[in-house]
Amino acid sequence: QDIWEEALEKGLQQGLQQGVTEGEKTLIFRLLNRRLGSLPETVIGQINQLPLPALEELGEALLDFSEIDDLLGWLESHQPE
């Protein structure tokens, strides 16, 4: 019974984390589209690969972006290893 409870708890935590990450991505894409216009598919793919901490950083950094090159430069310096 303890094994099932642990598995359920782990699954719930993973689900919550995934939900938070997807929500963060949705907000970032909406903000970037509003600030910079439509994003190229390659850029969307790069953003989708970012872990949650980097997404949170991008959420703050995008307030200073004025053109797509600002986003591209930020992404280049924040590539996952």
Image: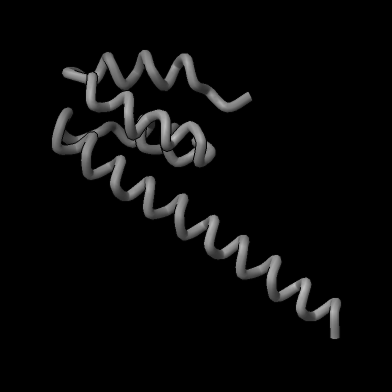
Q: How many marks?
A: 0
Query: Residue 30: x and y, percent?
Result: 22, 44
Query: Residue 31: x and y, percent?
Result: 22, 39
Q: Is residue 36 above or below residue 27?
A: above
Q: Residue at x 80, y 80 (%)?
A: 4
Query: Residue 20: x and y, percent?
Result: 45, 55
- Colour mapping: one colour
Query: Would residue 23 appear left or right of 14 to someone viewing this image?
Result: left
Query: Would residue 1 appear left or right of 8 to someone viewing this image?
Result: right
Quadrant occupied by the C terminus: top right
Q: Residue at x 42, y 36 (%)?
A: 56
Q: Residue at x 29, y 47 (%)?
A: 27
Query: Would residue 9 appear left or right of 29 to someone viewing this image?
Result: right
| Residue at the bottom extreme, as displayed | 1
Q: Is residue 63 above or below residue 16?
A: above
Along the viewing direction, whichever of 37 and 12 lies nearer the viewer: 12
Q: Which residue is drawn at 19% across and 35% down?
A: 38
Q: Quadrant of residue 76?
A: top left
Quadrant occupied by the N terminus: bottom right
Q: In this view, does 71 lie above or below 4?
A: above
Along the viewing direction, whichever of 57 and 81 lies nearer the viewer: 57
